[in-house]
Amino acid sequence: MSAPAQVPAELVDPNKLDDASVIVFSEGLVGQPRWRRFVLLTADGQDAVGVLQSLDDAMVALMVTRPELVVPEYAVSLTAADRISLGLDSDQQPLVLTTVTVHGDLITTNLVGPLVINPHTLAAKQVVLSDPGYSTTHPVAHLGAEE
Amino acid sequence: VLVLTRKSEQSLHLGDDILVTVLSIEGDRVKLGIDAPRTVSVLRHELYEQVRAANTAAASTHPSLQSIAHAIRTSKPMNSGIASASASANDESQS
């Protein structure tokens, strides 16, 4: 708590980033082909939520979570073409994140369109799952529910 | 919008790589066969729209650093509750 806060702008200044920290969605996100390059910002001491800050549009930032925290059995099945485009071998596990949205005090996450990232190369793709059991607005929690 | 009429078992090409065939028509249901490279994602429009909308909602669910900075730079100083409370206590009025 007493540690000085980092200056966030330094974390997302594209001129100060090396390529090794840039997550690249070569096709952009679904319906947003220009959202291609992101950095993942996380706060020390917690790994439940992070922010994907776009490097292509500074106004775009997506809150993300690890979906297995929400639905432990959540699984993303990748096609062979997905694995090729991500550069993932059949035995390599991707990093999977899902976007978080806040509706009033309800926090939801999009389990239909997970963000799948090769943890080694940071090549990434938004996969769309046709499993009818998943929702784009899967309820996660209520803000301030612990009070 | 380009409108084409096709009968059952007729096809159309989208570019060189994609072939769409009307397999059968039963009532208001049309069964399509899509022959496309594996790298081409084929999605029902409803699903595409859901995910697109979810992406847009996620991007606007909380302000980015830049949008907070923009809001602060462009906003007029707001009277805080304390300041306006003390102003009314002192019975000052600005007009």
Image (spheres, rainbow, N blue to C red):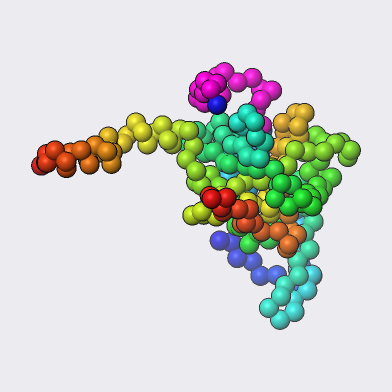
Give the residue displayed 76% in from the left and 34% down from the top: A118
Residue B7: image quadrant is bottom right
Q: Which residues are magenta?
A: A2-23
- Image spot of residue B66 (x, y percent): 45, 33
Question: Can residue B41 be found in the magenta stretch?
Answer: no
Above-or-below relation of B28 to B4:
below
A22 vs A80, nearest the viewer: A22
State the quadrant of the N terminus of chain A.
top right
- Image spot of residue A16 (x, y percent): 57, 18
A93 vs B7, nearest the viewer: A93
Q: Is residue A115 visible?
A: no
Q: Is residue A32 visible?
A: yes
- Image spot of residue A22 (x, y percent): 65, 28
A34 vs A146, nearest the viewer: A146
Above-or-below relation of A106 to A49:
below
Residue B88: image quadrant is top left
Above-or-below relation of A120 to A51:
above
Answer left or right for B28 relative to B10. left
Give the residue displayed 48% in from the left and 33% down from the top: B65
What is the residue that sits farthest to the right in this orientation? A91
Answer left or right for B46 relative to B65. right
Give the residue displayed 77% in from the left and 28% down from the top: A120
- Image spot of residue A92 (x, y percent): 85, 36
A57 vs B75, nearest the viewer: B75
